[in-house]
Amino acid sequence: MELVDTRDLKSLEGDFVPVQVRPRVPIGNMEEKYSQESLTLFSIWDLVVDNIKEISVVISIVTISGLIYSLSVQELYRSDILIAPVTQESNSGSSIEESLGRILPIDISVSPEKTNQYIEILKSRTFIEDFIRTTESKSIIFSNKWDKDNKRWIGIEPSDYKAYLIFRKDIMSINQLPKKNIYKLSIIWHEPEQTKLWANNLISSLNLRERKKAIIEAEKSMGFIQKQKESTPIISLQKSLDDMLLTQLSNSMKANINEEFSFVIIDPAQKPEQKYYPNRSLILILSFVSGILLSFLYIVFKNLFLNYRVYRNRQ
């Protein structure tokens, strides 16, 4: 047997005496093993070998759980549409507009303030609720509560506000691209064709809504200005009213000519061919890695617990 020198803790003079060290007990009884050596003396490989069964069970459970989740979760698809505020250059190719531009000062550019206003309208409750009603999308959003065969609701019809909340928080998102005056509107849904329709129709609906609003406002203003002009004998005031009338006529013509009134579509939404979520390969990889980490934590806490028991038994 191997002999080593160690300090006798009971010796008051500090003499060294030979102490016999017991041979290492074969792995099997973990508690007896840890009673002989500290945990810090074992290598990582020893820990893995000692607990290979437990490690395999933990990794298998976590990986299989990830696989079951990835197969059970509903598949989602995403369609993106790129839009930009209307500028003078974006519609410079219109022959009608070029002809009218020689007569009237038509400026179709949208200011940054107006662009922000259009973005907020696009995200607003009023606009989204109106869009859902117009496109009859509530039955699509709440398809589990809609009887498609009988064209009626199963139970109480969901409110427009609830439909708006789901559409705004879970389906639609819009963000400005970094350092560019371009916006990306994204639609996420479990039907690929529907994502394309919603994305394109949202921008078309906004452009149509703002066009109609601009035409109505311009016509009302022109009617009012015309009445004021007819009732005003002052020539200088009439000239000012003529300028105001010309401005409103320009606004009306701009709204009538340009279908892309608020935003010009740079890249329309397409039907997605690949699912957006879930990424099953990534889920499996993350599940496997998580299983390894959890098994490592299990080993650490298990060994700490065994060492603690040994320490308590020695007291």
Image: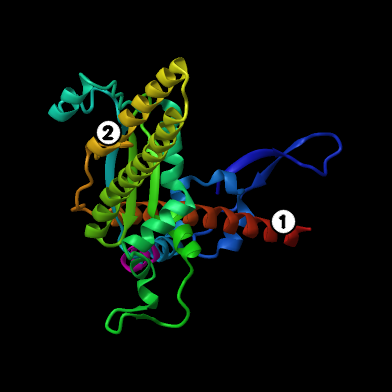
Crowd rating for badge 1 (residues with CA inside 10 Å; few <14, some 14–19, many 20+)? few
**Mark closer to the observer (1, 2):** 2
Q: Position of residue 297 (x, y in %)?
A: 53, 53
The way the protein has been coloured in the rendering is: rainbow
The amino acid type found where label 2 is placed reads: Met
Q: Nearer the viewer, residue 150 or 24?
A: 150
Residue 34 location, quadrant? bottom right
Q: Residue furthest left?
A: 95
Which image quadrant: the C terminus? bottom right
The residue positioned 45% from the left and 76% from the top of the image is: 157
User: Where 149 sits versus 27, above or below?
Assistant: below
**In front here: 204 or 39?**
204
In screen coordinates, is 301 left or right of 230?
A: right
Question: SS for tag 1?
Answer: helix
Q: Amino acid at mark 1?
A: Tyr
Where does label 2 land, which residue? 253
Residue 309 in the image, given as x and y percentages of width and height: 69, 61
Tell me the quarter of the picture where residue 56 sits.
bottom left
Which label's residue is closer to the chain start, 1 or 2?
Answer: 2
Q: Residue at the right extreme?
A: 12
Viewer-nearest residue: 44 or 160:
160
Work out whether 103 lies above or below 83.
above
